[in-house]
Image (cartoon, rainbow, N blue to C red):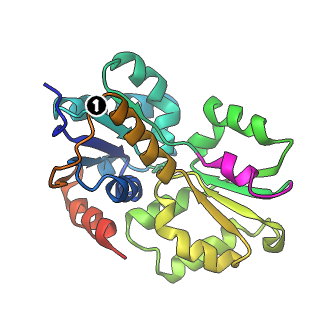
């Protein structure tokens, strides 16, 4: 039976969802969490939509078996591929997805130039296309797939020369001075935020959908009277590649 003590499940292809877990925990420190990363199958972003859908459905089934009261698909890629179907399968469980925070970026100033960093899959799916079309008149929106950034975070290589070289390559076709905003459209990327900001310069505003997803989770639980406001806030970390569990914990607690 689902109760207030039931965990909020958080799912990602690997480490990325930890950036969302951090926001959830900040907003709701008394909740119990069950984090599952599928690092064995990461990266998801370069797989076909069908492959990601199958993996996500399988993993969410596992999380539901843990008696989750809500499932946060803390992965833009898995959300784009499978959220709609999951909401049809699990009508009684709140399913929260992640999507690139293009709206607040587009509204941040008069006709800004926005770079949306995400996986190949997120940027080619219809879900993103609809979002993109909504803001293409109000902003100059540039899609920039950054698959290598997923690997660098997954291997804890953000503070390396390899990362510096990659950022240089990634943005080589763009004029840094003309960029107003960057949208971190993949949950792995907030772990590289400092590096990205340093590289692009302080004039660039960085947007991330995690906070909005955390607020949405709280709203949905509140509406069902399932908020746990007096619990001890226990977090369980699991991963399909067990050797990755220590890194999830490190990233969660890293300042
Ligand atoms: N963290 C995922 C996202 O938000 C994708 C990473 C991957 O390619 O596995 O899109």
Q: Is residue 76 above or below residue 158?
A: above
Q: Could you tell me if residue 45 is visible in this image?
A: yes
Residue drawn at (21%, 41%) of the image: 7
To which quarter of the image does residue 165 belong? bottom right
To which quarter of the image does residue 23 belong? bottom left
Q: Could you tell me if residue 44 is visible in this image?
A: no
Quadrant including the N terminus:
top left
Indicate left or right for 105 with 255 as reference.
Answer: right
Instruction: Identify which residue, 250 or 94, lies in the foreground.
Output: 94
Horizontal and vertical percent position of residue 177: 82, 74
To which quarter of the image does residue 168 belong? bottom right
Density class for disc 1 (Cα within 10 Å; few <14, some 14-19, many ≥20) is few
Quadrant including the C terminus:
bottom left
| Residue that badge 1 annotates | 225
Residue drawn at (38%, 31%) of the image: 95
Q: Is residue 17 magenta?
A: no
Tell me the magenta residue range.
100-110
Horizontal and vertical percent position of residue 204: 71, 70
The tally of labels here is: 1
Indicate left or right for 240 with 110 as reference.
Answer: left
Q: Is residue 173 above or below residue 129?
A: below
Horizontal and vertical percent position of residue 129: 70, 34
Q: Is residue 34 above or below residue 96?
A: below
Provide the secondary structure element on which disc 1 rests. Answer: loop
């Amino acid at each position: 039976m689902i109760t207030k003590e039931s965990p909020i499940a958080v799912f990602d292809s690997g480490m990325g969802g930890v950036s969302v877990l951090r926001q959830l925990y900040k907003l709701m420190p008394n909740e119990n969490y069950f984090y599952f990363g599928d690092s064995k199958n990461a990266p998801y972003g370069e797989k076909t939509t069908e492959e990601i859908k199958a993996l996500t459905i399988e993993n969410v089934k596992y999380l539901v078996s843990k008696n989750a009261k809500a499932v946060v698909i803390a992965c833009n890629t898995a959300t784009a591929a499978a959220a709609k179907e999951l909401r049809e399968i699990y009508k009684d469980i709140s399913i929260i997805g992640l999507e690139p925070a293009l709206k607040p970026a587009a509204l941040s100033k008069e006709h800004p130039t926005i770079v949306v960093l995400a996986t190949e899959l997120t940027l080619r799916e219809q879900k993103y296309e609809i979002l993109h079309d909504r803001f293409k008149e109000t902003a100059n929106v540039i899609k920039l797939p950054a698959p290598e950034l997923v690997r660098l975070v997954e291997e804890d290589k953000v503070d390396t020369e390899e990362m510096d070289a990659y950022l240089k390559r990634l943005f080589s076709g763009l004029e840094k001075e003309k960029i107003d905003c960057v949208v971190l459209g993949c949950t792995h990327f907030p772990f590289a935020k400092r590096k990205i900001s340093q590289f692009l310069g302080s004039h660039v505003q960085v947007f991330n959908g995690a906070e909005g997803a955390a607020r949405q989770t709280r709203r949905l639980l509140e509406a069902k009277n399932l908020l746990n406001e007096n619990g001890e806030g226990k977090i369980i970390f699991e991963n399909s590649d067990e050797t990755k569990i220590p890194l999830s914990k490190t990233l969660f607690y890293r300042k």
